[in-house]
Image (cartoon, coloured by chain):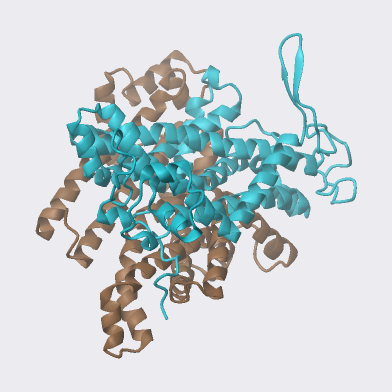
Chain colours: A cyan, B brown
Amino acid sequence: MSDRQPTTDRGRIRIVGFDDAAEQKRDSDASSDTADAAGTTADPSIASRGATGIDPTTASASALAQPGRRLENAWRRFRRNRSAMAGLAVIIVMAVLAVFAWPITVSTAEVTITLQPFSLAPYDPTAMFVAPPNAPPSLAHPFGTDWAGRDQFSRVLVGGRYTLSIGLVAVGLALCVGVPLGAIAGYFGGWIDEAIMRVVDVLYAFPFLVLAIAIVPILEPVPILGSGYWTVVVALAVTGWVGYARLIRGEVLSVREREYVTAARALGVPDRTIIQRHVVPNAIAPVVVQATLNVGTVVLTATALGFLGLGLEPGSAEWGAMLAQGRSSLLRGDWHVTVFPGLAIFLFVLAINLVGDGINDALEPDRDGRDDRRRMR
Amino acid sequence: MSLGRYVGRRLAITVPVLVGVTALTFSFVHLLPGDAVDAIVGFRDVSAETEAAIRAEYHLDQPVWDQYLLWLRDAITLEFGESPVTGRDVSATIGRRLPATLALGGAAWLLALAIGIPAGIVAAVSAGKPADEVGRLAALAGIATPNFWLGLILLFVFSVRLGWFRVLPPDAPLVSLATVKFLVLPTITLGTAAAALVMRLLRSSMRRELDAPYVTAARARGLPERTVILKHVLRNAFLPVVTVAGLQLAFLVDGAVVVEGIFSWPGMGRLLVRSILRRDYPVIQAIVLVIGIAIVLANLLVDIIYAILDPRIRY
């Protein structure tokens, strides 16, 4: 969904060994990064130490021009974004609820170590018949019970563990594969690029969910993957890395033409270091945005897999798997079995999207027309 | 580069991708754990003769490279053999279900455009105003709603409670009033997220176009705002929306896999899920191949149309 123009505005040159006071002027298109900062010159070392004692206007102006301050700046813009902060709050609350919903224990043959003793959930999420099956919501069971008489409220709380961690881990794994491959393809070009990008093209021909569905039976019997959890994570990572590879390759194609890359090459810096220190950091911003938004996509796909009864063991307190029984329950008229887990998925994915939008606006205010500098009328 | 050369180059890139897609689909059965024969018969015990017959039928007694070519030859002529689970001809099964999926997908696509395009225009024109913010939140909500959940809720409210629609598809031909009526809910379920994506895409590409000098020029000439937006900006802003048609197709296929099951719609998506649960691997293989090739060809077509529409695109 993101056919963006590659940017050329992420200079990150740092000249070491020169006089501290030497002013380093970023080239003209780098300073167009933020319009307020056009033409600003400043000493990188001052900004990286923090601009204490400088009056607010100069501080913000020089900070905007400073690569070292970019994150701090982005955070300031992000904080001003009310919907993004609301999304972040929802995610944090859901994560806390998921972690403290039920004790986490690690048990070996003899000893059981409790890592997290709290339990916010009123009932054991796996305990059956704590109340009559399919009971509608009541004070004792705010979300009612499912077909096996398990407390839905407890299951929704604990279910966040699956969904949230699958989203994070699968995206993290996909980034670990996609970013290096995409960066290498873009940096070296030639046959390496051709080879990697043809693989990407081939995988791109299969829809995300269809590919994951086809991969699950291949992974399922792999012993190290054990329970269905890792099967789902690996299937989603295998399908997910292509997007990042394609995105970062496009960015790298423009970054590698920049002067600081040429300079580093001329100084004899090994390619590996150039990619790690100079190319990837300057090409990563759109990938960060994409990865954040993709946590939502991955969660939707993971829950869809659970809904279809693939991957995780049936009966797991995963939000999607909880909906697997939803159709028959609904036809019987038990709406609560379906509504609450679905609402949880919806809330989480919505929050992720709000945060992703916020990061997009904070990292690259010029990318979208969302900044109102040149607002029409 | 002339258009002809561009098309030629684009076709040349497509060939290795098609080879990759077919090779990956072919290797699916071989990547499964255990012997390919087990996968094909669905892990049942079979007699030695049956096993030999299957080995011969699927050319498993030959080197992998030859197997691939023979499989490819069969695939091109749509010979996928018989399903070991149902015993039916795979191509015939898929052929029977393809129209249902195309009807549902096409309807959802039209709905996505019918909602996404006007909403995208309104959002772009009113950027920064409440209408834009409302549109943004609505689009995000559309993207964030799990389609299986939306489908279940719609089914519950409109079919079970209100009784406006049937719960199961009618036993009527595809082009009939009853079927069209039944398709309303699945179409909404499938089209909602796609509409949200179209809207967001169109909005951001229109925002870019609105800053272009030609818009200022058109306004300076005194053209009504309506003409500027609808005739000049929209036409240019459409191109990025067209380019992602291939991705949209993939998105709709993903949705169909889930939504068809909820509404018991006899399409390919439901067949795929059922085949996975039954371990009916030849059927899975054939469906995945059809989907992969459809998306590759859709992308090819989109790129060529794009080049015809926009003469600047040559690479």
Which quadrant of the structure image shows residue B130?
Answer: bottom right
Number of marks: 0
Q: Position of residue A217 (x, y in %)?
A: 50, 29
Q: Residue at x 83, y 39 (%)?
A: A149
Q: Is residue A95 left or right of residue A1?
A: right
* In this rendering, position of residue A72 left or right of residue A330: left
Looking at the image, which is closer to me, A291 or B62? A291
Whether residue B19 is visible to the viewer of this picture, yes or no, is no
Q: Position of residue B102 (x, y in %)?
A: 43, 57
Q: Position of residue A14 (x, y in %)?
A: 32, 39
- Front residue of this view, candidates B305 and A27: A27
Q: Which quadrant holds the N terminus of chain A?
A: bottom left
| Residue furthest to the top | A110
Q: Nearer the viewer, residue A46 or A278?
A: A46
At which x and y percent is residue A324? 66, 43
Q: Quadrant of the C terminus of chain A?
A: bottom left
Q: Is residue B196 above or below residue A209?
A: below
Residue drawn at the location 71% of the way across and 50% of the way down: A338
On screen, residue A263 versus residue A295, left or right, reads left
Residue A192, quarter of picture: top left
Decide which of B17, B231 is in the foreground and name it.
Answer: B231
Q: In the rendered image of this protein, does residue A168 appear above or below residue A59?
A: above
Q: Is residue A153 visible?
A: yes
